[in-house]
């Protein structure tokens, strides 16, 4: 996925049942069970991947969130799509 993100935005499915209370920082908590929400991966750094959510700018970090990189957080690697 990181290779694709270096060239373009990548759409992914995540398990988002418990993300409504995310306010910032690198998320590494419990996500819930199955994949039930789509987001876009828009960037990365050595320790996180950055996702754009559709819940508006009041969510997370102005509509974005960060997941710990290399951990398949919230099943982010389970359902990847890009042209």
Image (cartoon, rainbow, N blue to C red):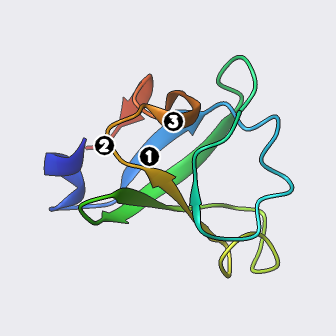
In the foreground, 58 or 29:
29
What residue is rendered at 15% in x and 62% in y?
Answer: 7
Picture coordinates of residue 34 (x, y %)? 69, 17
Picture coordinates of residue 27 (x, y %)? 60, 53
Query: As displayed, is residue 72 above or below residue 33?
Result: below
In the foreground, 64 or 70:
70
**Mark nearer the viewer, 3 or 1:** 3
What residue is rendered at 68% in x and 82% in y?
Answer: 62
Separation of marks 3 and 1 at Cα, in angstroms: 15 Å
Label 1: which secondary element: strand
* Label placed on residue 73: 3
Picture coordinates of residue 18 (x, y %)? 82, 39
The disc, 3 or 2, on the residue closer to the chain's N-terminal end is 3
Circle 2 Cα neighbour tier, 10 Å, few/some/many (<14 / 14–19 / ≥20): few
Label 2: which secondary element: loop
Whether the residues at callouts 3 and 2 have beta carbons within 8 Å, the answer is no
**Mark nearer the viewer, 3 or 2:** 3
Q: What residue is disc 1 on?
A: 11
Q: What residue is disc 2 on?
A: 82
In the foreground, 60 or 13:
60
Q: Is residue 33 left or right of residue 42?
A: right
């Amino acid at each position: 996925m990181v290779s694709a993100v270096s060239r373009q935005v990548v759409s992914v499915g995540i398990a988002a049942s418990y993300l409504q209370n995310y306010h910032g920082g690198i998320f590494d908590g419990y996500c819930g069970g199955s994949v039930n929400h789509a987001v876009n991966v828009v960037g990365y750094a050595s320790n996180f991947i950055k996702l754009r959510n559709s819940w508006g700018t009041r969510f997370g970090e102005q509509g974005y969130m960060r997941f710990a990189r290399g951990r398949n957080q919230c099943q982010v690697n389970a359902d990847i799509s890009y042209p």
